[in-house]
Amino acid sequence: MTPTHADTSRWLLRKPSDDAVARVFCFPYSGVGASMFNRWPRMIGDVEVCPIQLPGRENRMREPHYGTYERLAVDVADALIPHLDRPFVFFGHCAGSLPAFETAVLLARDGGPLPRQVFVSAQVAPHDCPRDRFLDMTEEQLRGELEQLVISQGGKIHALMIDLTLAVLREDLYANRVYKRHEPVQAPFGLSVVHWSDDPEVTEAELKGWEHYSDDVRFLVLNGGHYEFLSAPPSLLEHLAGAI
């Protein structure tokens, strides 16, 4: 892979530390940006947490949307190359798992550095896509979901912010709707597939399709609901650091 020296500062909320022994790169899910990881610690021991900022939201609001997960993977891989100089893992939740996986596949295809593990949380395998309950929702139903999520996380509803998030969410859902691998691809890196015990959106059985994507697939069941990961539960952080 030949880096094109993408402006890394746009893709990461903060410059990675040279003192980190390893790194966890976190991919946000549909409709939101890197700030969704604001309750995560900056370090898990000596492993640095690096939230990825996607175009079209938050401080990159004026930039055009990435379009598809495949195109996004090209841009993310290019931006991250300078920071893949030590052990690392990828983490994605729900739809964020898909560009995380595609970025790792692209790195493998182009001879780049590989993650020790790719963590895919609450997301069916690529050949079972698209599958997201948001895909069939009306505008008002999506708005209601966003408002409920804000409230559940202790925030206050601001109409303008909901409107902006909804605009991003619509484009992200398009990327989700058109994404599908028609058959599994064998990845040369490990996969950790996370199911949340109280998640009503994705069952443990629906995650089994990932077993066809690597010779090293681990299925983890962690306590909590679909959005439990937002609070950085110790059980998840231990698995992320332990994979490195």
Image (cartoon, grey):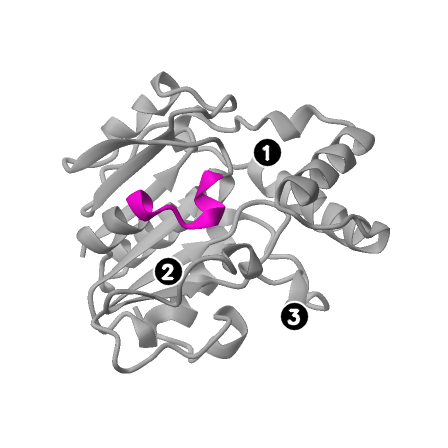
Which residue in the structure is indicated by mark 2?
25
Q: Mark 3 points at which residue?
A: 59
- Res 200 seen here: yes
Pick the residue in front: 99 or 151. Answer: 151
Q: Is residue 191 shown above or below 201?
A: below
Residues in magenta?
228-236
Q: How crowded is mark 1: few (under 14 residues within 10 Å), some or many (20 or more)?
A: some
Q: Which amino acid type is shown beneath numbered disc 2?
A: Phe
- The answer to if 230 sits in the magenta stretch is yes
Q: Quadrant of residue 40?
A: bottom left
**Residue type at mark 3?**
Asn
Residue 37, position as x, y percentages in the image: 49, 57
Badge nearest the viewer, 1 or 3: 3
Of mark 1 and mark 3, the one earlier in the sequence is 3
Residue that mark 1 sits on: 177
Q: Quadrant of residue 84?
A: bottom left
Q: Distance between the residues labelled 1 and 3?
A: 25 Å
Q: Is residue 128 above or below residue 244?
A: above
Distance of label 3 from label 2 (alpha carbons)? 18 Å
Numbered disc 1: secondary structure = helix
Residue that protrudes farthest toward the right in the picture:
159
Q: Position of residue 141 (x, y in %)?
A: 77, 29
Q: For this rendering, which residue is in front, 29 or 155?
A: 155
The dominant secondary structure in magenta is helix
- Residue 7 in sight in this render: no
Callout 3: helix, strand or loop?
helix
